[in-house]
Amino acid sequence: MAELLASSGYEPACSSGPRLGIPTGLKGLDAAMGGLEPGTLTVLASRPGLGRSTLLQNICQWNAGGTFLRGFPKAEEREAVPVLFASAEQSPEQIMARALSAAARVGRDHIRSGELVDEDIRRLKPAQSLLEAAPLYILAPAVFTDGQLVEHARHLVRERQVQLVGVDGLEAMGPDLSLGQAARALKTLARELAAPVIVTASLWAVSRRPHWRPALEDLHDEVAFAADTVVLVHREEAYDRTARPMEADLMVAKARSARPAIAADIAFQPHYARFSDIVAA
């Protein structure tokens, strides 16, 4: 970790001082970025397959009070935040499988195959009840447009007091929108709703460099400019199976009111479709 910080220009996140906005559910990430402020656009970016969609769904699900039955702050200790989760990348069935896996700590493969042991069933029943009660509203149409998203978000803010909007897939916002236009549309939506909007986006330029560690310059210029906050999702294990297994680096590469920092002590559990804080023994 120290070597990573020294070579990347990032600083270790400090948890002291006041923090504003809606929390992400990850103490390390909140310490680095200060939470999700109303009216702002946050971009979660990575190369394909490194977990940005999982991270977004975790943040949305945690805020709605529909996840992490054990090892995390209990849902009853905080007020659930109504959340809209819009996905152009997953079907409703895929979203629910991830949600149940994260909430119950049951392997996604078990849920997809239906090959559940008694312990899986014991964990899934309360997780399903928790998710059914959570104010997590899902929009996952076959064809995704920014107009549809805006209309749906406005309705839910007005009728259901939605306070957080997550969008999985900037690239699929609409066939007539460039990446820059899509990012600016989401920024406008955040300002209009006075709610934080989080969106996932791909990094591609990093594949053209011999060094695989991501940087802000690997994100599309117009997207980086529109974003208030950019978090780069990186896992060394994806490139070297022996390097820091089941650990993730969440790099806050841009933040309006903070210096670049890296979220400390973050674990990635792909079998449970979730990121978590590493808790010291």
Image (cartoon, rainbow, N blue to C red):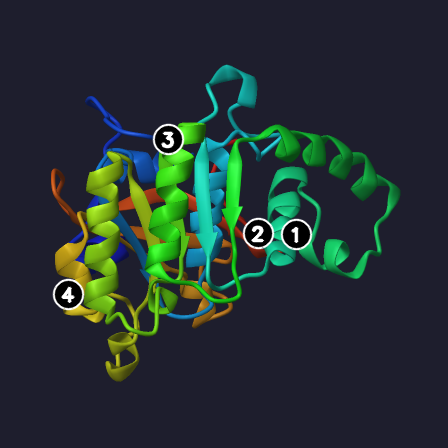
Between the residue at mark 1 and the residue at mark 4, the CA separation in whole angstroms equals: 34 Å
For marks 2 and 1, the one nearer the N-term is: 1
The residue identified by callout 4 is: 222
Q: Position of residue 55 (x, y in %)?
A: 44, 50
User: What residue type is disc 1 on?
Assistant: Ala
The residue identified by callout 1 is: 97
When the figure is inspected, residue 216 is found, relative to residue 131, above or below; the finding is: below
Between the residue at mark 3 and the residue at mark 1, the CA separation in whole angstroms equals: 29 Å
User: Would you say residue 252 is visible in this rendering?
Assistant: no
Helix, strand, or loop for circle 2?
loop
User: What residue type is disc 3 on?
Assistant: Arg
Between the residue at mark 4 and the residue at mark 2, the CA separation in whole angstroms equals: 30 Å
The residue identified by callout 2 is: 273
For marks 4 and 3, the one nearer the N-term is: 3
Q: In the picture provided, is 35 more to the left or to the right than 260?
A: right
User: What residue type is disc 2 on?
Assistant: Ala
The answer to whether marks 2 and 1 mark residues whose Cβ atoms lie closer than 8 Å is yes
The residue identified by callout 3 is: 158
Q: In the picture provided, is 158 more to the left or to the right than 20?
A: right
Give the quadrant of residue 184. bottom left
User: What residue type is disc 4 on?
Assistant: Glu
Q: Nearer the viewer, residue 82 or 254?
A: 82
**What is the residue that sits farthest to the right in this orientation?**
118
